[in-house]
């Protein structure tokens, strides 16, 4: 297979690569884009974890900085977000290492701030510049800021 098919029709390319793999025809595999796509699967899972975690942190910010709006609905939203993250981490334990990456945490904090500012109408300066909770604490079902 040539890189040209990959660029023209990635679905057809993927089907052909899967057929070659199943047939054991390894010499004809388009190795570099296969390796890139495999790495992209892991990156997609990290992005999904980041998205879910930023959404949780934004909810925790709203909980803490808008106490007058605390409700059963908001509590349920936080609990569900925590459960979904826990399930993802249980299904893919290697993602736990991502939680310890300071750059990743800084990025998700910025995303959480963006969500919280947009949804609350509060100024960014109303929120902490850095995440006030360790990720493990934010994920803890017993913790409520």
Image (spheres, grey):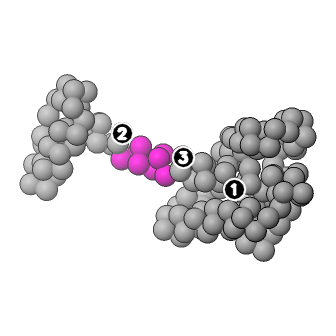
Q: Which quarter of the image is occupied by the C terminus?
A: bottom right
Of residues 111 and 80, the one drawn nearer to the viewer in this rendering? 80
What residue do we see at 60% from left, 63% from top?
85
Image disc number at residue 82 = none
Q: Secondary structure at mark 3?
A: helix
Q: Position of residue 23 (x, y in %)?
A: 9, 54
| Residue 139 visible in rendering | no
Q: Please give the residue where the numbered disc 1 appears in the rendered image.
A: 56
Does the magenta portion include 21?
no
Q: CA distance from mark 2 to mark 1?
A: 30 Å
Q: CA distance from mark 1 to mark 3?
A: 14 Å
Determine whether label 2 and label 3 are within 8 Å by CB. Answer: no
**Image position of 70 (left or right of 95):** right
Q: Main secondary structure of the magenta part?
A: helix
Q: Please give the residue where the numbered disc 3 appears in the rendered image.
A: 47
**Image position of 82 (left or right of 49):** right
2 or 3: tag closer to the N-terminus = 2
Disc 2: CA contacts within 10 A as few (<14), some (14-19) or many (>=20): few
Q: Please give the residue where the numbered disc 2 appears in the rendered image.
A: 36
**Image position of 70 (left or right of 79):** right
Q: Position of residue 69 (x, y in %)?
A: 84, 57
């Amino acid at each position: 297979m040539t890189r040209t098919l990959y660029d023209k029709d990635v679905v057809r390319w993927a089907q052909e690569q899967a057929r070659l793999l199943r047939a054991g025809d390894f010499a004809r595999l388009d190795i570099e884009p296969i390796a890139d796509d495999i790495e992209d699967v892991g990156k997609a899972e990290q992005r999904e974890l980041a998205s879910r975690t930023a959404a949780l942190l934004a909810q925790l910010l709203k909980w803490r900085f808008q106490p007058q709006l605390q409700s059963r609905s908001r509590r349920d939203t936080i609990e569900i977000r925590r459960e979904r993250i826990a399930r993802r981490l249980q299904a893919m334990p290697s993602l736990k290492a991502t939680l310890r990456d300071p750059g990743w945490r800084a990025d998700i904090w910025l995303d959480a701030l963006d969500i919280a500012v947009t949804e609350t109408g509060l100024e960014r300066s109303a929120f902490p510049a850095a995440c006030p909770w360790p990720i493990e604490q934010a994920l803890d079902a017993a913790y409520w800021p």
